[in-house]
Amino acid sequence: MIGAIGAIGAIRAMRAIRAATTSAVAAALAAPALAQESPNIVAPTQPAPGSFVARTSLRAVLFDGGEPAVARDGFVLEERFRLAYGITKELSIDGALPFYQGSFDDPAPGQAPFETSPVGLGDLDVNLKFRLFKEDLGPVDTVRMSVFAGTEMPTGTGGFSTESFDPQVGLAAMAILGHHGFSGSLAYRFVTGDTDEVLFPGDSGADVFAANVGYLYRLAPDEFTEEHVGAWYATVELLSTAETNGDFELTLAPGILFEAPRFAFELTVGFPIVDDVQYRPSSSFTGSIGLRFLF
């Protein structure tokens, strides 16, 4: 009898420990974590009510020609700062402000003059994001979907502004299933102006439709524990933009991601698979490094 009682007690204790461990892992991953976000794709995640997520990134874009009227040879550095704030469990607001520095070769003979060392702020991008669906399948696994809408505001300087309000609407979705993560987003931006420095999608005044998909594979750890301190992921993304003037670009972007409970580090490179553009310069390479912080 005493042995049976002891066995029952041991089983109950093991169940309690298992439940506590599962709860601890869930809390460590769900509350402060950054939810295995693809580096260059809008994620259906948002800060908890009253919390902030700050993100800073540095991106380099190499340009190597294009149609004679718009060709550029050189590079642009983009430093972008983004801040998101949780309003409710389902609603958040975020703003992103870029700063640009460029260096280009002199215009070719017969080409219209342009600034060879442009410097300036870009337009402020402000969006609201609303979560439509969230289903947690376990301590780590989850499926989520959100819609977002907002506008670019004409805050740019040095020729990097459309000098107009350019609204956008979009949809973002993700699924985390064990070691595997899948993400995707669709967005349409109504461009109502153009810029002096025509370098990126939308700068020529054409509307932009962006469709992006990503895959992440968790490299380490193999299993999360209650002592979870961070995880490494290999990432690959397909990033596309189609403009109403006919320009189309498709980029393959592999990378690496490290996510800890309170911060994340990401590094990606991008190579154009399709670069069918006529109204802006052609790009040959993109590299970016970013940091995210939750507080």
Image: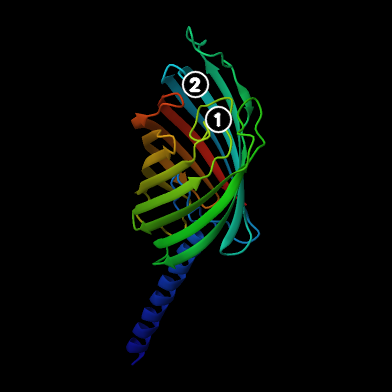
Q: Is residue 271 above or below residue 71?
A: below
Q: Is residue 46 above or below residue 2?
A: above
- The answer to which image quadrant residue 209 occupies is top left
| Count of labels in the image | 2
Are the residues tagged 2 and 1 within 8 Å (C-beta)? Answer: no
Between 181 and 119, which is closer to the camera in this rendering?
119
Circle 2: is it few (<14), some (14-19), or many (20+) Cα within 10 Å?
A: many
Colouring used for the render: rainbow
Q: Which mark is residue 96?
A: none
Residue 271 image offset from top left, x and y in percent:
36, 30
* Residue 215 seen in the current view: yes
* Residue 40 seen in the current view: no
Amino acid type, mark 2: Phe
Between 250 and 137, which is closer to the camera in this rendering?
250
Classify residue 21 as left or right of residue 236. right
Q: What's the residue at 36%, 29% (across, down)?
A: 275
Q: What's the residue at 41%, 20% (across, down)?
A: 67
Q: Which mark is residue 78?
A: 1
Q: What's the residue at 45%, 60% (across, down)?
A: 145
Residue 79 image offset from top left, x and y in percent:
58, 32
Local secondary structure at mark 2: strand
Q: Give the quadrant of the N terminus.
A: bottom left
Between 203 and 256, which is closer to the camera in this rendering?
203
Residue 198 image offset from top left, x and y in percent:
53, 26
Q: Which residue is mark 2?
A: 75
Classify residue 291 as left or right of residue 71. right
- The answer to which image quadrant residue 160 occupies is top right
Amino acid type, mark 1: Glu
Classify residue 181 as left or right of residue 86. left
Residue 232 image offset from top left, x and y in percent:
40, 45
Local secondary structure at mark 1: strand
